[in-house]
Amino acid sequence: GAGVSQSPSNKVTEKGKDVELRCDPISGHTALYWYRQRLGQGLEFLIYFQGNSAPDKSGLPSDRFSAERTGESVSTLTIQRTQQEDSAVYLCASSSGTADRGYTFGSGTRLTVV
Amino acid sequence: KNQVEQSPQSLIILEGKNCTLQCNYTVSPFSNLRWYKQDTGRGPVSLTIMTFSENTKSNGRYTATLDADTKQSSLHITASQLSDSASYICVVSGQAGTALIFGKGTTLSVSS
């Protein structure tokens, strides 16, 4: 597609439930990032995929968080047993993979855990 | 530790006035620095991108400067408009293949 697409745009879930967030990157982009942005806070790195290399998971806050990406296509971020502190906007970005290329962000998924 | 610090945290200006936002970073090695504009409820949108050899880059009313020696950047907004109200985020990229490092942003409010 023309841009990075994320779904759903909004998700309200009960505490303790699992949620799955989806990111469709720009076609041909080898790099894909997930970030989290809590209300009034800066962007927090979660995980980075680059082609078929092992992902950089160093930003995942706990083992309740996991992400998958098949090849250079769609990625899903899964949060298990959600907690209220997981409430945030989850942003996905993709790029062609070289450091001097632009990154394109999706509009994010606003997750609210009640 | 690689960090990006922005100031001020928030800023209120009158429509038509100019303003300058600051970004200091400690990222090393350094590849490039970006300024993003993030409207409420939207993803960040790139304004400028500069490598270490570039000192200034403009995008309409937005002008970014970079001093790679002092590791400082600024974003100057000229003749502000109400639509400039947003968060402005400074993002630094280290070596190729590593995650971007984000500042916490400056929230700009332009009032009439």
Image (tube, rainbow, N blue to C red):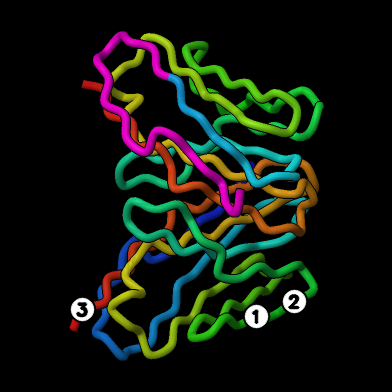
Q: Which residue is mark 2?
A: B54
In magenta segment, residue A9: yes
Q: Given the image, what chain letter belongs to the residue carrying mark 2?
A: B
Nearer to us: label 3 or label 2? 3
Q: Given the image, what chain letter belongs to the residue carrying mark 3?
A: B
List x then y, in percent, for residue B79.
38, 90
- Quadrant position of the N terminus of chain B in the picture: top right
Q: Eyeballing the image, is B75 above or below A109? A: below
Q: Residue at x 70, y 79 (%)?
A: B55
The amino acid pointed to by label 2 is Glu
List x then y, in percent, for residue A9.
37, 38
CB of mark 2 within 8 Å of CB of mark 1? Answer: yes
User: Which corner quadrant of the image does residue A59 belong to?
Assistant: top right
In-image side of B31 versus A6 (left or right): right
Q: Earlier in the sequence, mark 3 or mark 1?
A: 1
Secondary structure found at label 2: loop
Depth check: give the residue in front, A44 or A111.
Answer: A111
Spatial separation of the CA atoms under disc 3 and disc 1: 26 Å
Secondary structure found at label 3: strand
Q: Eyeballing the image, is B71 above or below A11? A: below
Q: Which residue is mark 3?
A: B111
List x then y, in percent, for residue A97.
77, 46
Other-residue count near label 1 (Cα within 10 Å), few / some / many at <14 / 14–19 / ≥20: some
In-image side of B50 versus A38 (left or right): right
Q: Given the image, what chain letter belongs to the residue carrying mark 1?
A: B
Depth check: give the residue in front, B33 or A105.
Answer: A105
Residue B40 got which mark?
none
Q: Residue at x 60, y 83 (%)?
A: B58
Q: Earlier in the sequence, mark 3 or mark 2?
A: 2
Spatial separation of the CA atoms under disc 3 and disc 2: 33 Å
Please provide the residue range marked out in magenta.
Answer: A1-19
Q: Are the residues flagged by discs 3 and 2 from a single subunit?
A: yes
